[in-house]
Structure formats: C-alpha cells, structure tokens
Image (cartoon, helix red, strand yellow):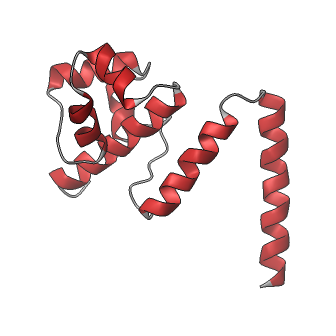
Amino acid sequence: MKNADEAKRVLGRSIALLRKREGLTQSELAEKLEVSDNFVGQIERGQNAPSLENLVRIANTLKVEVGELFGGKSTPVVSELPLKLEREIDSLILLLKDQSLADVRFLKKFAKLLFQEFQGRR
C-alpha cells in the first residue's frame, strides 16, 4: 500500500466484503462491536480508521486474522476496482453465499464458458 488513505480504503472494502460474507448489516456489526452504525460506515468507506483494539475486535467478529482485513491471502483485494464494479461483485457474493458448494462450482464453470464465448466474439 502506498499511503494511509489507500490502507483505509483497502481495510474498509475488506471489512464490508467480510461483513456481507457473514450475513451482517452495518448495524449488526456495530452492535457486536459496541460502536455506532455511523462509525462502521465511515470505516467501510475509508473515511475513518479503527483503533488497534477495535481492529482486533472486528477481525474476531468477522472470523478472520487481522492481516486479512488488509487484503491478506483469503480476502480478495478489490481496491483497484471501480466502485460500481465492486458493488456488483458484492451483490454476486451475496447471491452465492447461501448456495451449495456444488452449485457455486457449477456456476463458476458456466461463467468461465460464457466469458470464453464472449472473448471469442470480440
């Protein structure tokens, strides 16, 4: 990461993605952390940074290691994606999270075939 602003953006996007993966709203996460909804929203937008104590509490609540909040190996880093694309990806994750592993794998294979077909037409 190049600077603190980028770190806050990566952190915020990772927290939002992991929160959604856990099926939590910002309000529910805030309640578990005993902070305001507004504070969680500011963190997710990269406008504020949590204290080290809150960072550990966030990681524990989201069932990840602290490093994963900064794009560690199991967290997809989406900091370079345009915001609209990131939101679409988030909504796909929400659609997929309640599906069986077999269904997700099938959809992944199907998507790969579609992308290959589209690339062949360009």
- Residue 81 seen: no
Expressed as whole percent of the image width and height from the top left, the position of residue 49 reads 17, 38
Image point (37%, 35%), residue name:
15
Q: Nearer the viewer, residue 110 or 90?
A: 90
Image point (19%, 54%), residue name:
5
Expressed as whole percent of the image width and height from the top left, the position of residue 45 reads 29, 48
Query: Is 89 drawn above or below residue 93 in the view shown?
Result: below
Where residue 99 sits, quadrant-wise, is top right
Query: Is 121 drawn above or below residue 84 in the view shown?
Result: below
Q: Nearer the viewer, residue 43 or 114?
A: 43
Q: Is residue 14 left or right of residue 9?
A: right
Image point (85%, 52%), residue name:
110
Quarter holding the C terminus is bottom right
Image point (21%, 21%), residue name:
35
Expressed as whole percent of the image width and height from the top left, the position of residue 118 reads 80, 74
Q: Is residue 15 left or right of residue 111?
A: left
Q: Is residue 99 left or right of residue 39?
A: right
